[in-house]
Image (spheres, rainbow, N blue to C red):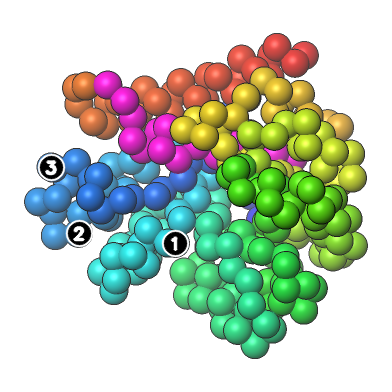
Amino acid sequence: MKNLFFYKLEEAVRTNNSRLCIGLDPRVDDIPAPFCNEDDPIFAFNKAIIDATSPFACAFKPNFAFYEAAGIEGITSLKKTIDYISPEIPIIADAKRSDIGSTAEAYAQSIFDYFHCDAVTVSPYLGEDSLAPYLNFKDKGIFVLCLTSNPGSMDFQIPNDLHIQVAQKVMRWNTAGNCGLVVGATKPEYLKIVRDIAPDIPFLIPGIGAQGGDLEKVLEFAPQGDGTGYIINVSRGITQPSGEGDFITRVTEAAARYHKLIHIAKENMA
C-alpha cells in the first residue's frame, strides 16, 4: 500500500494524465517586467505560472535556494506560493537537506510542519541517522539523491558506485514505503542500474529540458513493472520559455509540449 504522498501523487497523475513535475525556480533578475511592478514579484510570477500549467502538472517542485537568495521577502513568497497551489497537486520541496540528527529534525519540521510540503529532496551522505527525522514523517515523500544530473556526478557518485550503494541503502530504509530516489535523466544507462536495484521505489527525474536528458531513453528504464513509479521534472524549459510574444502563452505552450512529449515517448516504448 502506498503512503499518503505517493497515493496523492498517483491521483494527480491520473487526474491530469500527466507525469510532468514543474520546477518553480524564480531567478529574481529574470522575472519579466510586468511582474516586477507587483508588490510581490516572485509570488506574482509563480502564481501566473501555476495558473497556466496546473492542467499539465502532476506536481510542483519549488527549489528553496532561489527563495532564500531573496531574503525574508523570498521566504514569504515561497510560503505564499505553496499555500496557493491546489491541495490536489503535491508539492515537493527541492531543498536537498542533510545534517546531523538534531539539525535534520529542525529542517524536517520546517519543510513539513511550517511550509506544509508533501515531500522533500534530501542528501544521504551523512548516513541513516541524518535521514531518520524525515523518514519519521511516514505520510510524506522522501526523495533521496541517488544519481544527479550534473556533470560533477562523475566525481564521486559513479566512479565509486555511490549511486548503487545509495539505492541499496534506501531499499533497506524504506520500511514505511515513503522513500523515492532522485535519478538524473542525463545518464540513462546508469538509471537502468538503479531501477534494477530498486524496482519498486518511485523516481524523481530531473535533467530533461535545459540539461539535455534524452526522454525516450529515460522512459525505457524509469517505469516500475506496472508502468508507474516515476515523474519527470522540467524547470527552466517551462518557466523560462524561448521565443517571443506573450510570456504566459509561451509558458502554457511549453508545459503542453513537455506533457505531450512524455506521452509520445511512453507510446514509443509500448
Bounds of the magenta span? 229-243
Q: Look at the numbered discs 2 and 3 and tell me whether their residues touch, using CB distance below 8 Å.
A: no
Marked residue nearer the N-terminal end (1 or 3): 3
Marked residue nearer the N-terminal end (2 or 1): 2
Residue 177 percent coordinates (x, y): 81, 58
Give me the C-alpha separation between circle 1 and circle 3.
23 Å
Q: Which residue lies furthest to the bottom in this view?
A: 102
Give me the C-alpha separation between circle 2 and circle 3.
12 Å
Residue 222 percent coordinates (x, y): 75, 33
The residue under label 3 is 34
The residue under label 1 is 64
Q: Which of 110 and 55 is in front in this view?
A: 110
The residue under label 2 is 40
Q: Can residue 132 be seen in this view?
A: no
Numbered disc 3: secondary structure? helix
Give me the C-alpha separation between circle 2 and circle 1.
17 Å
Marked residue nearer the N-terminal end (2 or 3): 3
